[in-house]
Every structure is written in C-alpha cells, then in structure tokens.
Image (cartoon, rainbow, N blue to C red):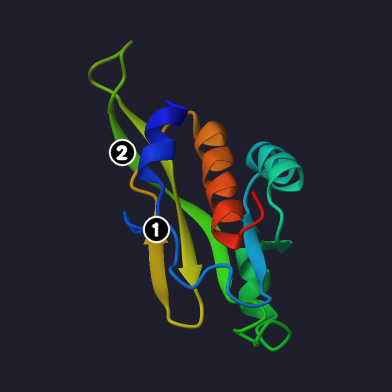
Amino acid sequence: MTGFANKRITEDNGAIPPDFGNGETTMFFITHHRSYNKYLEKNVEKIYKGDYLFIEHVDLIDQSDKYDDKDKYRYVFNYEYVNGGTSAVNPYRTTQEKEFYILDRKTNLVYKSPYSSASWSRVQKVYLKKLNKKMGKD
C-alpha cells in the first residue's frame, strides 16, 4: 500500500506544489477530531521537518488577521472524505477514505493526493516524507 502511495504522491501527479520548499513558510495542519489528531500530531512531529502549526479550520478563519501573511503561512494540509468503493465484508456498503490535499493560500490552488486509503495514517506518512524531500530535508 505505501508503495502505491509513494509512486502516486508526487509533484508531477499534482500532489505537491511546485514552489513548495522555496523560502521560509509555516505549514498549517488542520485538526479535526481527537482520534485523527492523535495520529496527525504523532506523524507530523516524528516525520515533518519544516515549520508547522496545528490549527482548527475555524481558528484559521477567525484569526485571519493573525495569519494574513500568505508568504509566511502559505500552505494548509488537510483532507476530505471520498468514497473508496465497496466493503469486502458488505458489498452494499461503501467505505470512506481520507484524501489529503495541500491548499496554497497564496495562489488559491489545491494539490490533491491522487491516492486515498482507509489506512490513511500510512498515506499521510508517505505524503510528509515526500514534502521533506521536496524541501531538501529528507
């Protein structure tokens, strides 16, 4: 599974912004619910080598003056749910998977991972490693 993610989460596939790693910037990692946040924080603190802040989406909006500098706070790492297909146990039920993306606040472009999985923590780890590589910090 991580082999598929590793091959697909690339700049050429539209998952990583071309300017990522150029200049000093702080990545926002959007927090959600406790079980997600636990793994998000663990993965980011262990793997990601750039500057970052954990923030709730509403705080990013409510504190827009504080984070208005789109050169310093350029990128947002988040996810959305996508349907992953039918369940192996129950073919009448579809699974939900997390599809990670990066929002470039400066250009307002979204860079989506072309790979999603119910094993989202593994995919997230691959994505973070790819971002490190793009920054030259792998």
Residue corresponding to mark 1: 11
- Mark 2 closeness class: few <14, some 14–19, many ≥20 residues within 10 Å: some
Amino acid type assigned to the residue bearing label 1 in the image: Glu
- Say which residue appears at 35% left-offset and 43% top-offset: 8
Res 114 label: none
- Say which residue appears at 43% left-offset and 69% top-offset: 18
- Say which residue appears at 66% left-offset and 74% top-offset: 25
- Say which residue appears at 37% left-offset and 32% top-offset: 4
Residue 72, percent across and down?
67, 81
Task: Check the image and report above or below for 97 versus 88.
Answer: below
Work out whether residue 116 can be spotted. no
Asked whether, in this view, residue 31 is left or right of residue 102, the answer is: right
Q: Nearer the viewer, residue 49 or 88?
A: 49
C-alpha span from label 1 to label 2? 24 Å
Identify the secondary structure beneath mark 2: strand
Residue 20, percent across and down?
53, 68
Asked whether, in this view, residue 32 is left or right of residue 93, the answer is: right
Residue 89, percent across and down?
33, 10
Task: Check the image and report above or below for 108 versus 131.
Answer: below
Task: Check the image and report above or below for 131 versus 69.
Answer: above
Residue 78, percent across and down?
53, 56
Nearer-N-terminus badge (1/2): 1
- Mark 1 closeness class: few <14, some 14–19, many ≥20 residues within 10 Å: some
Res 83 label: 2
Identify the secondary structure beneath mark 1: loop
